[in-house]
């Protein structure tokens, strides 16, 4: 019967996906822990940008253009 072959393929696929999801979750948890450890006292924001809360974001470099001085 072809039904048992498809069942075996489906269960094998589900096992592979489950394993991949577990590995992905472990990797994400490790990354999260590493980021939490780096940010302790270093002033690093969750996005990885250092600096205090009063600093502005200027990746486009337009803050100098708006400066009236």
Image (cartoon, rainbow, N blue to C red):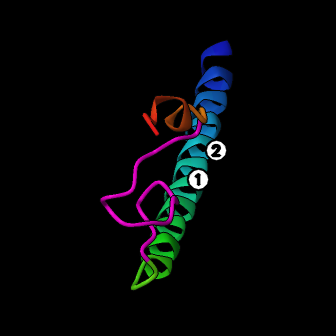
Q: Is residue 57 above or below residue 53?
A: above
**Residue 49 magenta:** yes
Q: Which residues are magenta?
A: 43-59
Q: Residue at x 50, y 65 (%)?
A: 50
Q: Which residue is mark 1?
A: 19
Q: Tell me if 45 is positioned left or right of 16 in this view.
A: left
Q: Which residue is mark 2?
A: 16
Residue most extreme to the front: 69
**Residue 23 magenta:** no
Quarter of the rendering containing residue 61: top right
Q: Dot 2 lies on which element?
A: helix
Quarter of the rendering containing residue 55: bottom left
* Residue 23 visible in the displayed image: yes
Q: Relative to the observer, which residue lies in front, 4 or 27? A: 27
Q: Relative to the observer, which residue lies in front, 1 or 60? A: 60
Residue 4, horizontal then vertical, whole percent: 62, 24
Q: Tell me if 1 is positioned left or right of 62 in this view.
A: right
Q: Are dots 1 and 2 in contact, CB under 8 Å?
A: yes
* Residue 1 visible in the displayed image: no
Q: Tell me if 9 is positioned left or right of 45 in this view.
A: right
Residue 12, horizontal then vertical, whole percent: 64, 39
Q: CA distance from mark 1 to mark 2?
A: 5 Å
How dense is the environment of label 2, judged by Cα within 10 Å: few (below 14), some, or many (20 and up)?
few
């Amino acid at each position: 019967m072809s039904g048992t072959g498809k069942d075996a393929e489906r269960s094998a696929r589900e096992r592979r996906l489950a394993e991949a999801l577990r590995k992905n979750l472990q990797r994400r948890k490790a990354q999260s822990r590493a980021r939490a450890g780096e940010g302790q006292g270093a002033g690093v924001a969750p996005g990885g940008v250092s600096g205090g809360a009063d600093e502005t974001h200027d990746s486009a470099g337009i803050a100098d253009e708006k400066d009236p001085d």
